[in-house]
Image (cartoon, rainbow, N blue to C red):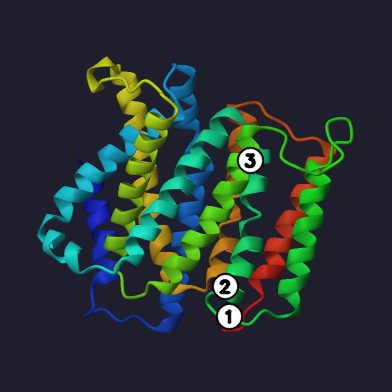
Amino acid sequence: MWHLPCINRIVNNVNNSNNNPPQNSKHYLAVLGLLLGAVCWGIIWYPYRLMAEAGISGAVSSFYTYCIATFFASIYCAKHWRSLLTLSPRIIVLAAVAGWTNLAYVLAVIDGEVMRVMLLFYLSPLWTLILAHFWLKEKTQLTGYIAIAVALLGAFVMLHEPSVSSLPLPRNTAEWLALSSGMGFSLTNVITRQSTHLTVRAKSFAVWIGVLLISLIYILVTNTALPAPQTFSVTQWGTMVVATLLLVLATLVVQYGVTKMEATKASVIFVFELVVAAIASYFLAHETMSTNEWIGGGLIMAAAIFAAFNHQD
């Protein structure tokens, strides 16, 4: 398939120990990777929503798209299978957390309003800041504390609806899933940042396996029907292949970017996804945001910018 050479080049560039570009070049490549990943994640919700409109649940779509990704990754990584037994147990934790993060994200954007889901997800710099401080022992500066306060204020403005509830809480299952996905994304970033001994190939493969298994568990627990592969139309398979290409590219470049950059800064650069998602949701789903959602979202983005300057290089 045409996308494999592209993936090979990305992975070879990451793991080729003979090429040691200057530190600035690595930084720019990390930023570029995160921006590219943000674009992919900003539009990946649309293929899954198309599948949901055709009667295929998000869990089933996730299971099959990650089956496709894992199949090709297994072929590519076949010569590395022997090394699987020597990998750190931490990769199991990474797989489980990343699995829930990706599945929850898909389920949220299918049933919820795209931008509200995205904004709740993008409280992730707040969670990353806290995790990085206590887990990675990264020093929190004044801007970090400002980011926490502004992010919480933004969430309050966006979520507070006196006619629904006196508490500023997510108003439906999709929004709770989005919130949990953002927390999972932060934890995934911190684990990835800490697991420098693992290659980008290993971490990416762990993510795909994780989503596949978590999706299957979710399907079994919720008694969701799992259609046989032959029941899908050519159009549906094409849609899932497009989603697979996006998620494979996004996983590889994001794993590279997060490995080369501080966890909080990586999360902040990823906020570019909000811009992509806002444009995509307006033109593809005809969704608009209310005034309090714009204000709350703006505060959350401002918090992310503050978090970007939480660490000194």
Q: Quadrant of the C terminus?
A: bottom right
Q: Earlier in the sequence, mark 1 or mark 3?
A: 1
Name above or below for residue 196 compared with residue 55. below
Question: In the structure shown, which secondary structural element does the residue marked by tag 1 occupy?
Answer: loop
Q: Residue at x 61, y 76 (%)?
A: 133
Residue 41 at what x, y percent from top left?
A: 49, 46
Measure the C-alpha gap from mark 2 to mark 1. Answer: 6 Å
Occupied quadrant, residue 285:
top right
Please say if the residues under marks 2 and 1 sit with CB atoms less than 8 Å apart: yes
Q: Nearer the viewer, mark 1 or mark 3?
A: 3
Instruction: Please rate how many residues cluster around mark 1, counting C-alpha atoms within 10 Å: few if below 14, some from 14 to 19, many from 20.
Output: some
Q: Amino acid at mark 1?
A: Glu
Which residue is tagged 2? 132
The secondary structure type at the circle numbered 3 is helix
* Residue at numbered disc 3: 176
Relative to 3, say whether 183 is above or below: below
Mark pair 1, 3: CA separation? 28 Å
